Amino acid sequence: MVDCATLTSVTLCPTFWAGLGGGLSVLLSAIGAGIGIGISGPAIAGAGVERPEVMFKTFIATILAEALAIYGLVVGLLSVFHITDALTLAGSVRIFAGGLTMGAAALGAGFGIGTSGSALAAATAEKPEIFSRAVITLILAEALAIYALVTALLLVLQAS
Amino acid sequence: METETLSHIVRDNYIIAKIRGEKGKLLERQQIHSLAEFRTQSEILGVLAEGSYGKELSELKEGSSPIETERAVRLGFARGVKTLISSSQGPARDFLLEFSRRFDAYDLAAIVVFKAQGKTWEEFVSTRQPLALLKEAELHRLYSMDDLRTIVGIVGDRALVNRVKGFSMEDLVGEKASLVRDIITGWGEERFYNYLNDKLGGFDRGSCLPIVGGTVDLANLIIILRSKLIGIPSVREHLISSSWKLHDRTIDQLLVAQDVTQALDLASSHPYYHRILSGARQKYEETKSLSFLEVASRKHSIHMSKRIFLGFPYTLGVILAFLVMKENEARNLAAIVAGVGAGMKPDQIRSLVAIPE
């Protein structure tokens, strides 16, 4: 059993790596979701001022951005559940990698959802009939985070 | 990614989405054509009541004159721009304010022309563009003055004062009044063009310059042609010093042209402007007026604006493109209302409006 109490031994401490992985997953995903909502939200409001009828449809951007935080939370919680005395250093590094993968991907996806969601709101405000086609870019941006979620889950679930 | 672009994505997406929504409500070509078919003003008002000018038009009294209706349309446009200004921040707000400053030149030009025509202050106020930043009290003070260079010197700069040298209020009749008007409004456009060149960079500058640069070039062309029409020898003194695609060599060639028709032939062979100026000589010979050039200039701006809307959405060019289209719509409606009020035929009215193709 590694003693995690001192700074010199912390790099060999499984709890540290697993905790850091879970924490990064939640933190970076929340930042990604914040970016997504923060960028698309004002555009949805702007579109809603001119065309209230499209506002509800364009909310999909903020919902998808919010989902990023949920993905991060899922990976984070699973990471926490794996922090036991039986956790090895190799397993904890897997959890760290999984958390980092999820967090970093959510950060990128958040920016993508924010900008494409903002453009979706603007385009739908101008021509409401193009919503069903314009939403595809938003879904593709969300897919980036789903790829990371799958990878992160595989990494975390194989940790023990 | 450039800093300005990131700033537009994060900060200006509200206003950009709002603009897209408003753009979707602009009158289509067919609707403008239909409005020109109406025979009474009340029919036009009935169609426009539901649109973006509804608020101002609903305040018109029964039997309002075409001038009052035109003013209501202008007020509707001004309200739209002022709403955009109040909902924007940072460089986008500065940009919108600078756009509004252009209208100070239009006010100044209108003061000079109205005074030269002996019209009253009330007549001026009822037709002025309400978007200008100059206060009404200041305008009233200017209206009480009689010396052209003094009036121009208060609102304009030394360059503008020099450009109107040789003119006095007493001799501003007909084409001469139009020339001074063009010089003053051209100066306003030049000021905006210089702002774009000096203060903006990257995508913002690149997307706005084709619209504003084209306006400056065509304003210069109109000044040259009008000077030739009047027979003014020292045209260069009155020209806008900035230019976009109308380079010095072309301007020199235009200046030495013998008459308006020769200058129009030269201008219509220009590699950049030949598309909008093709057939210009024929139009001039048919109408014996240069008013078609103003419509051509607006059509060029609309063409450029439509191209900007097809490109990258996060630039100040999108805001400018919308304002150009909205301003054009307001001018078209004002022309239609005036045309219908004057009993003109639909075809004649259509020749006064710039309709996007």
Image (spheres, coloured by chain):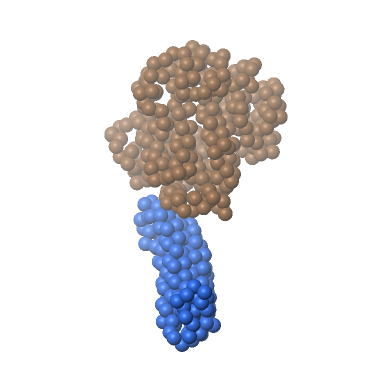
Chain colours: A blue, B brown
**In the image, residue B241 lies at what x, y percent?**
61, 27
**In the image, residue B83 lies at what x, y percent?**
38, 43
**In the image, residue B240 lies at what x, y percent?**
59, 27
Which residue occupies 48% across, 27% down? Answer: B105
Most foreground residue, A41 or B83: A41
Most foreground residue, A111 or B37: A111
Is any part of residue A50 visible from this angle?
yes
Q: Is residue B238 left or right of residue B152?
A: right
Which residue occupies 44% across, 68% down? Answer: A27
Residue B176, placed above or below residue B21: above
Which residue occupies 69% across, 38% down? Answer: B271
Most foreground residue, A68 or B73: A68
Which residue occupies 62% across, 17% down? Answer: B232
Q: Is residue B341 left or right of residue B257?
A: left
Is the C terminus of chain B in the top left, top right, bottom left or bottom right quadrant?
top right
Is any part of residue A150 visible from this angle?
no
Task: Single out the residue that lies furthest toward the top.
Answer: B170
Q: Is residue A24 left or right of residue B296?
A: left
**In the image, residue B220 lies at what x, y percent?**
60, 28
Is the N terminus of chain B in the top left, top right, bottom left or bottom right quadrant?
bottom right
**Residue B292 lies in what quarter of the image?**
top right
Residue A136, placed above or below residue B104: below
Most foreground residue, A94 or B179: A94
**Residue B280 lies in what quarter of the image?**
top right
Count of picture labels: 0
Q: Is residue B203 left or right of residue B86?
A: right
